[in-house]
């Protein structure tokens, strides 16, 4: 099921990205020869009656493409009878718009998904004082401290705490005790009050599973909200109360815009930091996730609920947008760089040079994807 959801998400992201290139090219009268999902070899394709574009499904489900006439220059696109509809003969500003249209659509898709999420109900961190407003909030584990009792017991971020030592989480309306970060902290303190710490039984919800584990508090060095370090008994988890919060349309539009902008900036900063580390040879491949890793992440998100899957899809769409803008051959950013160079030098780059650079870039990207995929598989072993 996780693999199916992954391919549906991938299909949506690719379709929207390539549709952006397609629509922009058509708007400027550029001929589009093929709209492909996946990479060749081709499985099947069709054309609309009287149409010029072939729509194809290809064997390798790792991307997609739009074959724009003249984007990879040849004699026909430069001097042929349809030269006026060639990408290379359009003004540079039109070429640039066609190239960034895919990235733009990925950003728009993320924004639309966030708007829908905020309208339908977005997972949001709340304060304990808001529990009366959101009685069905969940106490979710936000982070697990390495080498702590929780980490050694296999507790994972995203797990929801449903009970601790027999005290079950109930809504306020049900008259039971609401589990909060404070309640867990108090329980840990009580278990650590004697000369020997008393084990705590933690019941967790992970997707549709219910798990029970026994944790004994240990003295751990923790960082306080003020940034200071202190040692105290703990089980090694950071918690937050999460509730599904719905917003009216005007708030949803603004919050989606704010969220899209913030995450776009975070992706740029994160990718920039990784590339800087790669340039010095200190990059950690564990920071990079390929198709295999994303399948697991999609599965985790869908297990938490549809709202989480929507927000995760939006985040992946923003990542795809930023990565595609990198000035690397075969990516949109690389082709955009070629357009800028041609504008500055006043003459086109030799077709043989441009085509060779894009081919080499494509091969290197495939090799990188292979390396990352192997890394993902190793993580699972």
Image: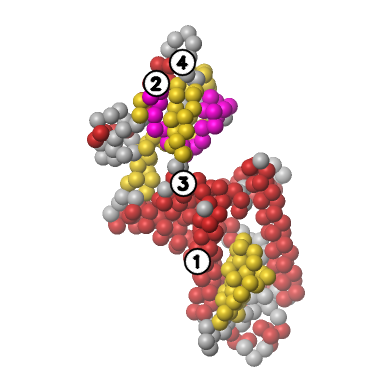
- Mark 4, residue position: 198
Query: Which residue is rendered at x = 44% and y = 54% of the image?
Result: 310
Q: Disc 1 to disc 4, how far (Cα)?
A: 55 Å
Asked which quadrant contains residue 360, the reply is bottom right
Query: Which residue bears the numbered disc 1?
Result: 16
* Label 4 Cα crowd, 10 Å radius (few <14 / some 14-19 / many 20+): some
Residue at the image position 34 percent from the left and 45 percent from the top: 244
Residue nearest the observer in this picture, 251 or 236: 236
**Residue 187, numbered circle:** 2
Residue 168: percent from left, percent from top: 35, 29
Q: Which structural element holds mark 4?
A: loop
Q: Magenta stretch?
A: 147-166
Local secondary structure at mark 3 = helix
Quadrant, the C terminus? top right
Q: Secondary structure at mark 1?
A: helix
Residue 157 colored in magenta in the image: yes
Q: Which residue is mark 3?
A: 303
Distance, label 3 to label 2, CA atoms, is 28 Å
Residue contact between numbered discs 3 and 2, judged by CB atoms under 8 Å: no
Q: Nearer the viewer, mark 1 or mark 4?
A: 4
Between discs 2 and 1, the one toward the N terminus: 1
Q: Position of residue 101 (x, y in %)?
A: 52, 69
Say whether residue 40 is visible: yes
């Amino acid at each position: 099921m996780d693999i199916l959801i992954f391919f549906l998400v991938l299909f949506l992201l690719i379709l929207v990205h390539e549709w952006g290139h397609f629509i922009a090219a058509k708007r400027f009268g550029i001929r589009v020869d093929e709209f492909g999902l996946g990479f060749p070899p081709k499985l099947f394709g069709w054309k609309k009656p009287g149409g010029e574009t072939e729509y194809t499904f290809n064997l390798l489900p790792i991307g997609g493409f739009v074959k724009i006439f003249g984007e990879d220059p040849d004699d026909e696109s430069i001097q042929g009878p349809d030269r006026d509809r060639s990408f290379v003969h359009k003004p540079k500003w039109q070429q640039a718009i066609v190239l960034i249209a895919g990235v733009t659509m990925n950003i728009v898709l993320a924004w639309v998904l966030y708007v829908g999420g905020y309208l339908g109900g977005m997972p949001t961190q709340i304060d304990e004082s808001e529990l009366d407003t959101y009685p069905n909030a969940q106490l979710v584990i936000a982070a697990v401290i390495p080498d702590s009792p929780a980490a050694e017991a296999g507790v994972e971020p995203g797990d929801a705490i449903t009970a601790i030592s027999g005290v079950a989480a109930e809504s306020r309306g049900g008259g039971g005790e609401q589990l909060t970060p404070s309640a867990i902290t108090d329980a840990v303190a009580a278990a650590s009050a004697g000369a020997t710490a008393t084990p705590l039984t933690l019941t967790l919800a992970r997707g549709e599973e219910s798990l029970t584990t026994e944790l004994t508090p240990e003295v751990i060095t923790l960082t306080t909200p003020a940034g200071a370090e202190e040692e105290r008994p703990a089980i090694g988890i950071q918690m937050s109360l999460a509730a599904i919060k719905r917003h009216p349309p005007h708030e949803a539009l603004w919050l989606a815009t704010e969220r899209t902008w913030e995450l776009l900036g975070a992706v740029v900063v994160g990718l920039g930091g990784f590339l800087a580390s790669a340039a010095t040879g200190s990059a950690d491949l564990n920071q990079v996730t390929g198709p295999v890793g994303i399948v697991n992440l999609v599965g985790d998100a869908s297990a938490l609920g549809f709202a989480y899957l929507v927000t995760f899809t939006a985040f992946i769409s923003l990542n795809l947008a930023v990565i595609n803008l990198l000035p690397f051959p075969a990516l949109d950013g690389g082709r955009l760089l070629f357009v800028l160079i041609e504008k500055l030098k006043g003459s086109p780059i030799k077709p043989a040079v441009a085509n060779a650079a894009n081919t080499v870039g494509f091969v290197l990207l495939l090799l990188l994807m292979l390396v990352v995929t192997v890394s993902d598989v190793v993580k699972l072993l």
